[in-house]
Amino acid sequence: NTGHNFDDTKRYVDQVAWLSAADKKKIFEDNAKKVYGRLGKRLAERPSAKQ
């Protein structure tokens, strides 16, 4: 057991030195918002997003 879930790919993406913060935002955030069209609005409604 490695202590990591089999689909935990974030740790690999985080280790890629040539990916900029903007690239990582595209991978982790923007892709999810494209796939789940209502996600952006729901996240914006959360109290933690308004701080």
Image (cartoon, helix red, strand yellow):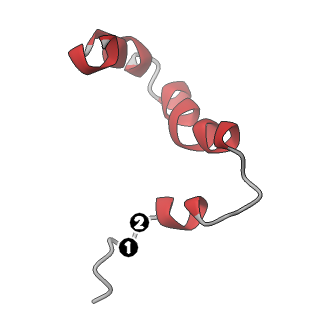
Residue 39 x/y as whole percent: 39, 21
Q: Nearer the viewer, residue 49 or 34?
A: 49
Where disc 1 sits, the SS reads: loop
- Give, as a three-letter code, the residue at label 2: Asp
Residue 40 x/y as whole percent: 43, 17
Residue 35 x/y as whole percent: 51, 30
Q: Residues within 10 Å of mark 1 (few under 14, many from 20)?
A: few
Q: List the residue tagged with mark 1.
A: 6
Which residue is found at the position 72% from the left and 52% from the top? 19
Q: Does 41 sit left or right of 45 as displayed? A: right
Figure quadrant of the N terminus: bottom left
Mark seen at residue 7: 2
Which residue is found at the position 56% from the left and 67% from the top? 12
Image: 35 above or below 44: below
Q: Nearer the viewer, residue 37 or 2?
A: 2
State how far apart marks 2 and 1 are (Cα): 4 Å
Q: Nearer the viewer, residue 4 or 33?
A: 4
Q: Answer yes or no: do the residues labelled 2 and 1 have beta carbons within 8 Å?
A: yes
User: In the rendered image, which quarter is residue 44 located in?
Assistant: top left
Q: Does 43 sit left or right of 22 as displayed? A: left
